[in-house]
Image (cartoon, grey):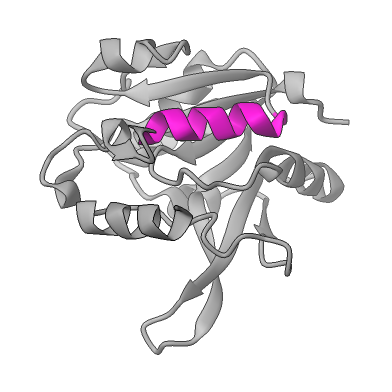
Amino acid sequence: MITPTDITALILAGGRGSRMGGVDKGLQNFMGLPLALHTLTRLQMGGGVGTIMINANRNLAAYESFGAPVWPDVLADYAGPLAGFLTGLERCETPYLLTVPCDTPLLPLDLAQRLAAALEAENADIAMAAAPETGKDGHMQVRTQPVFCLLRTELLESLVRFTQEGGRKIDAWTALHTTDVVAFDAPSDDPQAFFNANTLAELQQLESRAA
């Protein structure tokens, strides 16, 4: 059985923040605290992980002040979330790595537990979250959330090979492995749990809903 001490969580805060005008997204204020600190606190409150790390490429001292180890990308030039996955797998000292973005401050408290239960039940390599989203046609659909993954750390060699060949898309890599998609769409699930703030306007919108 997968226990919290088997899981290291990695907060992905290594992006350029392009859609926020180039600001460091994880350090933007939400309800009085930096976004990434909210994410860290949610992971701690949930109790589903043993260790927490942060992947960041700038303002490292600010992230280190949160009390978690901070690791920059092992790939150059802001290579995207998969570079964070690679960094986390290289630094992870537990059998499993949980990846979460820094811009979803309302992520489910039971995220790690549900992904771990699914990965174990299906004997999968990866468990990936999925959540309801409004599609372009206005209808609600359950869509995968590729940055929310529980990975076996033995996948490191595969990801090294994939990125060395130029691969950068999470779903293109996860498709190479047994991946179980876990839907967070129960009536008791918060529909805002996976809402990510890509712009400052979206961050303000999310803050007004959470207030």
Q: Is residue 208 left or right of residue 118?
A: left
Image quarter for residue 36? top left
Q: Is residue 35 left or right of residue 191?
A: left
Image quarter for residue 191? bottom right
Please, which residue is most extreme toward the front here?
A: 211
Residue 122, can we see it?
Answer: yes
Question: Which residue is painted at 54% across and 28% down in the image?
Answer: 41
In reply to whether residue 26 is colored magenta, the answer given is no
Question: Which residue is painted at 59% across and 61% down in the image?
Answer: 130
> Which of the pair 133/201 is nearer the observer?
201
Image quarter for residue 85? top left
Please, which residue is most extreme toward the right here?
A: 1
Q: Which residues are magenta?
A: 34-48
Residue 155, can we see it?
Answer: no
Question: Which residue is painted at 33% across and 52% down in the image?
Answer: 197
Give the main secondary structure, helix, strand or loop, of the magenta stretch: helix
Question: Which residue is painted at 36% across and 83% down in the image?
Answer: 136
Residue 185 is situated, as x and y percent measured from the top left of the image, at 67, 67
Q: Is residue 119 left or right of residue 139?
A: right
Residue 201 is situated, as x and y percent measured from the top left of the image, at 22, 58
**Which quarter shows the N terminus?**
top right
